[in-house]
Image (cartoon, helix red, strand yellow):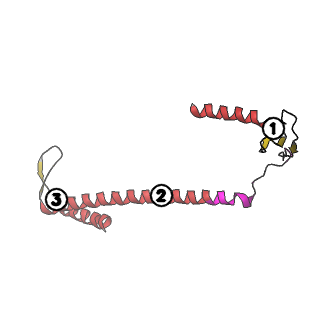
Amino acid sequence: MNSLHALIFTSLLTGLTLPVAHADTYKWLDETGNVVYSQTPPPDGTAYETLKTIKPSHNSPTPVPTPETSKPVADIQKRTDQRAAAQKESAEKAKEEELRAKNCQAANKNLEVYTRYKRIRKEDGEVVRIPDDVRAQKIEEYKKAVKEYCD
């Protein structure tokens, strides 16, 4: 809310000072010999000089961006887009590497279980013996997974 108040105050102040900015400027010497500048002539009839002020032209055209002037903005936007794409690619690569590491760890663990033990515990807690042909098939399956994810 404070910024809104500041904006309103600045707008009012600017509106009130614009007519003053276009007023003439007067220059004179006071009774002690100091040079005085003012927007009103001296009140006591002292000799003064009116200074010419340069008033802004209201007919001056607003500059239109051209390809030459907008090129730096386009370059900045291009670099920003490239940086965002590189960061996105880097994040995706990091995610992929993390997933590969988890898959490698799981494949090594499963290969160890099927290589060492002939019995496994099911999720419900029951211990069952693994048939040799199923065990051999699982060992080959996890060896391939280790090669795929751990190399």
**Quick one: quadrant of the N terminus?**
top right
Question: Is there a contact, CB below 8 Å, between mark 3 and mark 2?
Answer: no
Q: Where is residue 111 drawn, in percent x and y?
A: 20, 62
Who is closer to the viewer here, 1 or 124?
Answer: 1
Amino acid bearing label 1: Gln
Indicate the position of residue 35 as horizontal and vertical percent values. 78, 45
* Disc 2 crowd, CA 10 A, few/some/many (<14, 14-19, 20+): few
Task: Give the SS element for disc 3.
Answer: helix
- Residue 69 lies in the magenta-colored region: yes
Q: Residue at x 88, y 35 (%)?
A: 45
Ranked by sequence position, the earlier of labels 3 and 2 is 2
Q: Nearer the viewer, mark 2 or mark 1?
A: 1
Whole-angstrom CA distance, mark 2 to mark 1, is: 59 Å
Q: Secondary structure at mark 1?
A: loop
Is 92 left, or right, of 8 in this rendering?
left
Residue 39 badge: 1
Between the residue at mark 1 and the residue at mark 3, the CA separation in whole angstroms equals 96 Å
Q: Quadrant of the C terminus?
A: bottom left
Q: Residue at label 3?
A: 113
Quarter of the image where one finds residue 6: top right
Counting from the top left corner in percent of width and height, residue 55 is at 84, 45
From this view, report whether residue 109 is shown above or below residue 16: below
Q: Could you say which disc has been placed on residue 87 in the image?
A: 2
Report helix, strand or loop for mark 2: helix
Q: Which residues are magenta?
A: 58-75
